Each structure stands twice: as C-alpha cells, then as structure tokens.
Amino acid sequence: MRLTFRPMPLFSLFCLLLFAGLMWLGTWQIHRLHWKLGLIAEVNRNLMAPPLSLDAALKLGRGAEYHKVALSGRFDHSKEGFVYGIAEGVPVYHVLTTFTTTDGRVLLVDRGIIPQENRDPKTRRAGNSEAVQRLVGVWRQPDPPGPFTPTMDKAERVWFSRDVAWIARLDQVQLAAPVLIEADATPNPGGWPKGGQTVITFRNEHLQYAITWYALGLVLLGCYGAMHVSLGRLGFR
C-alpha cells in the first residue's frame, strides 16, 4: 500500500496562488505589527523627553510629532475658536487660540476643554491672561477634516475638526508651522480651559489579522486535500 496523489492541474494552480496570497498577507501583517510597536515606542520616548525649544521642533519637522515644546509669549484671546468634542460622554469645546512667542512667531494652541456653558469668554476671564506666560504642550500634526465632517459655523467660530490651515486663513495669521500645540495639564486660573487633553490611541490588531490569514491558508490546504480525497485522487492504494 502506498500513497498516491493525482492533482488537478488548473485547480491546483489556483489553490497554490491563493495559498501564496494568504501567506503573503499574513507575513505583511507581521511586518505591520513590528512597525506599529516601533511607532508606539517612539511616541512614548518623545513624550517622556524634556521639552524642546521652538527652533529645535521646527528643525525636526515631522519628527517633532508628540514631542513636548516649551514656549514663552502671549495668547490673543480675541481670536478664540472652538472645536466641538466629547469628553467623558459630555459635549465640550476645545479652545483654540493663537499664541505669539516673545520673538514674534505665531502658533495655534489647543488650550484644553471647556463646558458648553463656558464658551463665552466672560465666564472664564481669570483664565484668559494677557500677560507673557510660559507654555508647555505637545506638538501635533492635526488630522484633516473628513468628507463627512460638518462645515464650520463662522458666526459662532465653531469647528468640527482642528483644521489648522483654515483657521489660520480665517484669522489672517501666518503660522510658524502648520501644527497644533496641545497644552499640558498645568491648571489655568479659574480652572478653564482644562488642558492635558492629548489622547494617544494606536489601533494595533495586526497580530489577529496575521493569525486570521495564516489560518485561512491552513483551511485552504485542508479543503484542497479533502476534495482530492473525495474524488479518489489522494489516498492509499
């Protein structure tokens, strides 16, 4: 008694190509897993590093993402804008304000969140100082608005995405960089805005995807063998 195998040529070629594709997809997800883990480690290193100066951040370019920066200057509270958001299940607004450094460069700062009832600056005058102050925040490249993002309310200066370029054009300011500085959790007088709202989430399901593709490859091999057995093309004789 010996094992005999008479493969069906075209079907076998199709299964071979499909199996190779499934293995490639699984391996690609493993590469993506290592890339994502490296990215998470890099972001954590950046956040733990001492704050950069503005010049150092500008020199790094996109490499400054998630680095803390330290700035000195004044806010222009007359140019406050508001980005609608949700915090702990409650509607809030992120307060976006232009910040002019002591050497005259302008950046856009997300100072943190306020409740809906505090959107009027008169309700939080203590937190809107005109004096020179030191600011520490996280350097971020904001995501552009999506195709379904609602349009801004110009009259109320309310946005539904942190579109830095559009806000700068509306306020007629030239930004030193098309980024957003997310203020740290240092309390503001009066409690508002509440900083420290940087959220870092990286979806990392690449291992599950890799296992799925590899498992589908094994299922394909099983089905391929079972079909040949059922047709009498694979077995002991």
Image (tube, helix red, strand yellow):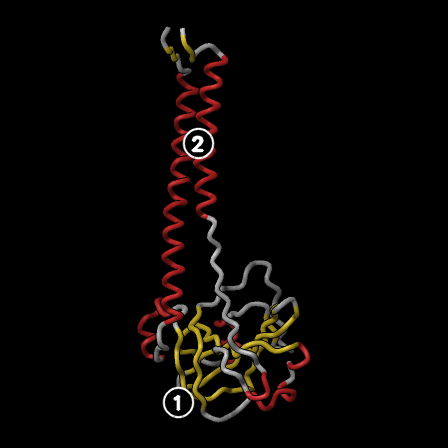
Q: What residue lies at 41% left-to-right and 30% top-to-bottom?
A: 19
Image quadrant assignment for residue 125: bottom right
User: Where 182 sits versus 217, above or below?
Assistant: below
Q: What residue lies at 47% left-to-right and 14% top-to-bottom?
A: 229
Q: What residue lies at 39% left-to-right and 23% top-to-bottom?
A: 13
- The residue most toward the bottom is 131
Residue 129: horizontal and vertical position, in percent?
Answer: 53, 91
Residue type at tag 2: Gly
**Label 2 element class:** helix
Name the one closer to the observer, 116 or 149: 116
Q: What residue lies at 47% left-to-right and 33% top-to-bottom?
A: 216
Tell me how far mark 2 sits from mark 1, CA to CA.
Answer: 61 Å
User: Where 25 sits versus 198, above or below?
Assistant: above
Residue 194: horizontal and vertical position, in percent?
Answer: 56, 79
Q: Residues within 10 Å of mark 2 (few under 14, many from 20)?
A: many
Precedes in sequence: disc 2 or disc 1: 1
Q: Quadrant of the N terminus?
A: top left
Name the one closer to the observer, 40 or 78: 40
Q: Quadrant of the C terminus?
A: top left
**Label 1 element class:** loop
Residue type at tag 1: Thr
Residue 189's disc is: none
Residue 117: horizontal and vertical position, in percent?
Answer: 68, 80
- The residue most toward the front is 1
- The residue most toward the right is 117
Image quadrant assignment for residue 22: top left
Q: Which residue is mark 2?
A: 217
Residue 177: horizontal and vertical position, in percent?
Answer: 40, 75
Q: Which residue is mark 1?
A: 102
Foreground: disc 2 or disc 1: 2
In this image, 216 relative to 85: left or right? left
